[in-house]
Image (cartoon, rainbow, N blue to C red):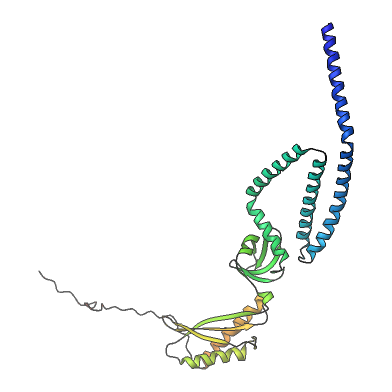
Amino acid sequence: MKELWEHFLESLKSLNEELLTWIDDFVRSLPNIALAIVVTVLGYLFSRVVKKYFSKALSRFSKNLTVNRLLANITTAGFMLLVLFLVLSILNLERALQSLLATAGVAGLVIGLALQEPIINFLSGVIMSTRVYFKVGDLVETNGYLGIIDNINLRSTVLHNFQGQEVVLPNKVVLQNPFINYTVSRQRQVEIVCGISYGDDLEKVKNVSIAAIKDKVAYDVKKPVEFFFTDFGDSSINFLLRFWLKDTQQLTFLEIRHTAIVALKKAFDENSITIPFPIRTLDFGIKGGVPIGKAWDKKE
């Protein structure tokens, strides 16, 4: 019983000494704790200033409010992370700081590998928002698709094509591949490919074709109508006719191309120029051999 009591007293004494040590360490750490609190408060207040001025700076380069806010929040979070590291250092918690950095590094690597594709699309969206390549409502052609831009977000670009469907393209493929913005260029070219008979006068065909476009089609008169014979086809001599439009709208493009085809056909009919049908010649004989229908001599 006496030994048990003595053991109890020893435990109380050890606990008291430990508490006194903690209190002593706490008292000695009070200046550091106070400094850490001051740094935290000042860091928070300063982060709001950083966010405000960073947002204003971004607005000079990008009109995308969603991207601007996101980048401002990321910058603010990074600044507060630096404040956290500074506070841990002031409180002499280097081990906790090292563990936090190691954990953050491993977590960042794992997340980066797992979300590689979304991250690339996100960064592409950020780049596209800071550089005015195109905007909602523009007529563009990219990755084999032609349509009007409906939406641009941080992951994808949405086109509305002329078949009434929505085409969702990851920002990465839009940024990495060539595209044409007809709205920004403010001009568009119409190309018509056709063929005429081998018996027609080629110079006459050229003059009649150019005159038909100039007389019947509303094209950009500041640029010439261009006509080129391209190749000898199976049943026709083919040519390329092209001219420019001021209006880039798809409906205008289709209407003017329609008008140009009708004008060409009418001009060819009036000038006896033939657009030939495909012709196939069947040879029922054997060149250098015995014609079909002649019997072979049989030798017994």
Q: Nearer the viewer, residue 154 or 294?
A: 154
Q: Is residue 170 visible?
A: no
Determine whether, in the image, residue 102 is placed left or right of residue 42: left
Determine whether, in the image, residue 300 is placed left or right of residue 50: left
Determine whether, in the image, residue 51 is placed left or right of residue 292: right
Question: Residue 176 placed where, x, y %?
Answer: 61, 63
**Compared to 15, does 252 lie above or below?**
below
* Residue situated furthest top in the rendering: 1
- Which residue is found at the position 67% from the left and 63% from the top? 158
Question: Residue 69 placed where, x, y %?
Answer: 79, 58
Quadrant where the N terminus is found in the figure? top right
Quadrant where the C terminus is found in the figure? bottom left
**Compared to 284, does 106 lie above or below?**
above
Q: Is residue 226 visible?
A: yes
Q: Nearer the viewer, residue 59 or 4?
A: 4
Question: Residue 96 placed where, x, y %?
Answer: 76, 38
- Which residue is found at the position 86% from the left and 49% from the top? 44
Determine whether, in the image, residue 209 is placed left or right of residue 118: left
Task: State which quadrant residue 84 falls in.
Answer: top right
Task: State which quadrant residue 56 falls in.
Answer: bottom right
**Compared to 264, does 11 lie above or below?**
above
Question: Residue 101 placed where, x, y %?
Answer: 72, 43
Q: Nearer the viewer, residue 30 or 40?
A: 30
- Which residue is found at the position 88% from the left and 49% from the top? 42
* Residue situated furthest left in the rendering: 300
